[in-house]
Image (tube, rainbow, N blue to C red):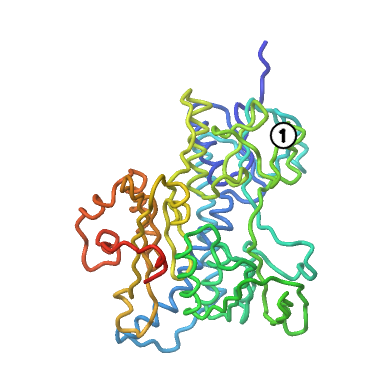
C-alpha cells in the first residue's frame, strides 16, 4: 500500500520562486502547503528589488530638480522627509505582500507562518508550533541573506541592506563597503538623498563580472554625482565613538561616518534547515547542489532560486519554478536556459546588460570579435551644463555577425535592455540591427546606428 502524506508538495520559503511553484501546483489539483518564517513575498518584495527601486526613485528626484532648473523651473524650499517616505514605502510593501498571500489562498495553497525545518526527506517541523508535516515532495526556496565579515573588529556596529530599508533617521554621512550592484545602488540612493556618501571596495574596480568599459564608465559617472570612491582598500576595524563610527582602513586612512553598511555579498539561506537529515547536499559555498532540473541529491526534494546560487535574479527564480512544475507535475521535463539573460543595475546612472562582455566574447567566440562603442551626452542634459555621458556598446561575433552582447550605462538603460535582450536571445545579426530604422530623437537610436568598429589596441576610446 502506498504511503500517504499530508501534502503532495511542501514548499519552504514564500518568495517569488516558492510562491509561483506552489500556486501552479495547487491550481493543477495537488495538495500544497508553503511555509514562510518572515513575510510572504521574500527578498524581492520585502527587502530587495521592490523597496530598493522605490528608494532609487525617491533619490532620483534631486537630480531631476537640477535638470528642471536648467529648463527654467525653480523650486523654493524643496526638501525630502525620510519618515514620510518610509511610511509610504512600508504601506505599499504590505499591500504587495498581502496580494501574494491572497493569491496563494485563491489557488488553494495552505500558508503556514513559521520556520520549517527538515527532519527527514519527507517530514518538516514547524518550529515553535509543535507541528510536524509530511509531504511526498518538497521544494526548498529559502533564498539568500546578506553576508558580512563577522571576524572584523567592530562589525557589530555595521548594518546590511536589510537594515538600510528601516533606518530610523537618514544619516548625514554613510560609508558603504562593497563593489557589487547592491553597494553601487545604495551609494546612489543615499547620495541622491543628500547623504555624504563614500564607497569602498577592495578590488581594482566596481561591478566585478561586468564588461570592463561599463565598470570604468560607471565608476567615473557616480563620482560626478558626488560619491567618493575608494578602490583597492578594505576595513581594518570599526570603532564606535560619541559622534559616529570611525572606519579604520588598511591603507592607513580613517574616516568617521554615522552609518556603515556592508554590501559584501549574499549567501544561500540554509543555516539550521535540516538539509543533512534529509540527505540534501550543499557545495563549498553553502548552496544547495541541484541538477539541470533543480533536483537535489534527495530523490523527492528540489530547490530553486538564490538558495542554489545559480543566477540570483527574481525573474530567473520564477522561471525555475515554472520549469520545476512542468517537469515534476506535467510530465514535460524542462530546465531554464541561463544564456542571454538581461539584467539591470539601478545605479545612478543605471546599467543594462545582456549577453557577453567583450572579454567573455574574446574567450568564447571562435574567431575575432567586433566591438562598437559610443559615449555621448544625453539630450536631456543639454541645458544643465552637466558633463555626464551615456555609454553604449555592442559586442559582435565577427564570424557569424551575431550581436552577442549589449551594454548600456545611462538614463533608462534597464528599459532599453529588456527589448535589446529579445534581439540578442533571437540571435539577430549586426546587419539586422542596422536595418532597423531609428526612432529620433532618442538615446536608443544609437543602438541601431553604430557604424565604426573599435580598433584593436584602442578598446577604451570614446
Q: Quadrant of the C terminus?
A: bottom left
Q: Nearer the viewer, residue 256 or 354?
A: 354
Left or right of 183 on screen, residue 276: right
- Using the rendered view, name the quadrant where residue 288 is placed: top right
Neighbourhood count class around disc 1 (C-alpha, 10 Å): few under 14, some 14–19, many 20 upward: many
Q: Which residue is mark 1?
A: 124
* Numbered disc 1: secondary structure: strand
Left or right of 111 on screen, residue 73: left
Q: Nearer the viewer, residue 45 or 85?
A: 45
In percent of the image, x 42 and y 47: which residue is there?
365
Q: Residue furthest top?
A: 1
Image location (x, y in percent) of residue 199:
60, 73
- Using the rendered view, name the quadrant where residue 257 is placed: bottom right
Image location (x, y in percent) of residue 119:
76, 33
> Can you say whether 292 is above or below 269 in the image?
above
> Can you say whether 113 is above or below 236 in the image?
above
Amino acid at each position: 500500500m502506498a504511503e500517504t502524506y499530508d501534502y503532495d508538495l511542501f514548499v519552504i520559503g514564500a518568495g517569488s520562486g516558492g510562491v509561483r511553484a506552489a500556486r501552479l501546483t495547487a491550481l493543477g489539483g495537488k495538495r500544497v502547503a508553503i511555509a514562510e518564517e518572515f513575510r510572504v513575498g521574500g527578498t524581492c518584495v520585502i527587502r530587495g528589488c521592490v523597496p530598493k527601486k522605490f528608494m532609487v526613485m525617491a533619490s532620483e528626484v534631486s537630480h531631476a530638480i537640477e535638470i528642471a532648473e536648467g529648463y527654467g523651473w525653480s523650486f523654493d524650499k524643496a526638501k525630502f522627509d525620510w519618515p514620510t517616505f518610509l511610511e509610504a514605502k512600508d504601506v505599499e510593501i504590505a499591500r504587495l505582500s498581502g496580494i501574494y498571500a491572497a493569491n496563494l489562498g485563491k489557488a488553494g495553497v495552505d500558508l503556514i507562518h513559521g520556520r520549517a525545518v527538515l527532519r527527514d526527506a519527507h517530514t518538516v517541523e514547524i518550529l515553535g508550533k509543535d507541528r510536524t508535516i509530511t509531504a511526498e515532495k518538497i521544494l526548498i526556496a529559502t533564498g539568500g541573506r546578506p553576508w558580512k565579515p563577522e571576524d572584523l573588529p567592530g562589525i557589530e556596529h555595521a548594518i546590511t541592506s536589510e537594515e538600510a530599508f528601516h533606518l530610523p533617521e537618514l544619516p548625514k554621512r554613510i560609508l558603504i563597503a562593497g563593489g557589487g550592484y547592491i553597494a553601487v545602488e545604495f551609494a546612489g540612493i543615499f547620495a541622491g538623498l543628500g547623504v555624504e556618501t563614500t564607497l569602498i571596495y577592495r578590488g581594482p574596480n566596481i561591478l566585478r563580472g561586468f564588461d570592463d568599459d561599463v565598470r570604468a564608465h560607471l565608476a567615473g559617472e557616480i563620482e560626478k554625482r558626488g560619491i567618493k570612491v575608494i578602490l583597492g582598500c578594505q576595513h581594518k576595524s570599526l570603532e564606535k565613538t560619541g559622534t559616529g563610527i570611525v572606519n579604520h582602513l588598511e591603507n592607513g586612512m580613517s574616516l568617521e561616518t554615522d552609518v556603515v553598511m556592508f554590501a559584501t555579498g549574499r549567501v544561500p539561506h540554509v543555516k539550521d534547515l535540516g538539509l543533512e537529515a534529509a540527505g540534501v547536499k550543499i557545495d563549498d559555498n553553502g548552496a544547495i547542489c541541484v541538477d539541470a532540473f533543480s533536483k537535489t541529491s534527495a530523490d523527492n526534494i528540489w530547490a530553486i532560486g538564490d538558495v542554489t546560487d545559480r543566477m540570483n535574479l527574481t525573474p530567473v527564480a520564477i522561471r525555475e519554478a515554472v520549469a520545476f512544475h512542468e517537469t515534476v507535475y506535467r510530465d514535460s521535463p524542462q530546465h531554464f536556459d541561463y544564456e542571454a539573460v538581461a539584467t539591470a543595475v539601478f545605479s545612478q546612472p543605471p546599467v543594462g546588460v545582456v549577453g557577453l562582455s567583450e572579454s567573455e566574447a574574446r574567450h568564447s567566440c571562435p574567431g575575432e570579435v567586433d566591438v562598437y562603442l559610443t559615449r555621448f551626452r544625453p539630450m536631456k542634459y543639454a541645458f544643465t551644463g552637466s558633463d555626464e555621458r551615456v555609454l553604449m556598446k555592442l559586442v559582435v561575433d565577427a564570424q557569424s555577425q551575431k550581436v552577442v552582447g549589449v551594454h548600456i550605462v545611462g538614463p533608462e538603460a534597464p528599459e532599453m535592455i529588456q527589448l535589446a535582450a529579445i534581439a540578442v536571445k533571437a540571435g539577430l545579426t549586426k546587419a539586422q540591427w542596422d536595418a532597423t530604422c531609428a526612432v529620433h530623437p532618442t538615446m536608443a537610436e544609437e543602438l541601431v546606428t553604430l557604424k565604426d568598429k573599435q580598433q584593436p589596441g584602442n578598446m577604451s576610446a570614446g
